[in-house]
Image: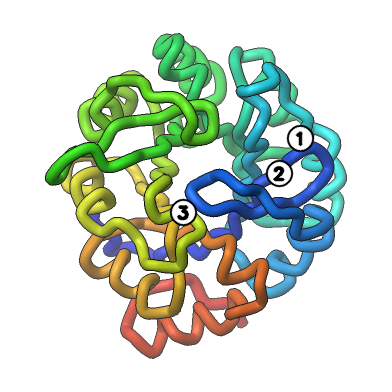
Amino acid sequence: MSSAGNVRLIARLDIKGSNLIKGVHLEGLRVIGSPQDYALKYYLQGADELIYMDCVASLYGRNHLSEIISFAARDIFVPMTVGGGIRSVDDATQILRAGADKVAVNTAAIINPGLISDIARRFGSQCMVLSVEAKQVGMDRWEAYIDNGRERTGKDVVEWIEEATAMGAGEILLTSVDREGTRKGFDIPLIRAVTSVVSVPVIASGGMGNLEDMAEVIKKGEADAVAMADILHYDRATIGDIRAAANALGINVRNYA
């Protein structure tokens, strides 16, 4: 999907238990601090949205984010997407009631693709975000992984995303496992391979090392939104810095008075 509209700047918070964590290639998870403190910081910096991902929920068959989200919803007034361990419409209902605006589903959607349609029918496609963890397996070929990048699915990323959007997924959170946490820039061919075939918004995630990486994934990858973690968590840039840089580069981002 072309990013002719305003590009969204999204803070991504990966959660393990009660902690905000950060890894490399979704592994080697390091505790950063309290998700509440960081979420509020990014909200006050002007993040357009927040994404919370429980990175061990699928592994342990549970989701612990309801409490964190209900707490955040008292102070944060931008859309919040929540993923990790959502296996049913009931799980989605619980997260949405806690204060989330959208749910992101990966593992359960692979196991039971009908869940995509079920959530989209109940809450609307705009609420059903397909989370995809992609690893490159050949020239211009990527495989979808589940369980926080641990398990292969045999599914081609582009084909899977086309299938899922046809079933009602209204947005794609596309994470490059190869680039995640590396600061080496986004996987532009991956992002472009997806944005060129779907008409729903695509959020690029994994690899943002500097402000130029953001410009490249928007201009060349045609991403509709950029999810950032490492660059924010380690105070290498603020949302304000990133917004100013986008404006200077002629990228359409939301601006706040």
Quadrant for residue 212, please give it. bottom left
Coordinates of residue 12 in the picture (x, y in percent):
59, 54
Which residue in the structure is indicated by mark 1?
Answer: 65
Q: CA distance from mark 1 to mark 2?
A: 8 Å
Which residue in the structure is indicated by mark 2?
Answer: 15
Q: CA distance from mark 1 to mark 3?
A: 22 Å
Q: Is residue 97 left or right of residue 160?
A: right
Q: Is residue 188 left or right of residue 176?
A: left
Q: Which of the two residues, 45 or 236, is positioned nearer the viewer here?
A: 236
SS for dot 2: strand
Q: CA distance from mark 3 to mark 2?
A: 15 Å
Labels 1 & 3 near each other (Cβ < 8 A): no
- Going 69% across and 20% down the picture, which residue do you hit? 60
Q: Is residue 39 left or right of residue 176?
A: right
Labels 1 & 2 near each other (Cβ < 8 A): yes
Name, please, the residue furthest toward the left.
139
- Going 47% across and 22% down the picture, which residue do you hit? 120
Name, please, the residue furthest toward the front.
28
Q: Residues within 10 Å of mark 3 (few under 14, many from 20)?
A: many
Which residue in the structure is indicated by mark 3?
Answer: 180
Amino acid type, callout 3: Glu
Q: Quadrant of the C terminus?
A: bottom right
- Going 43% across and 79% down the picture, which residue do you hit? 211
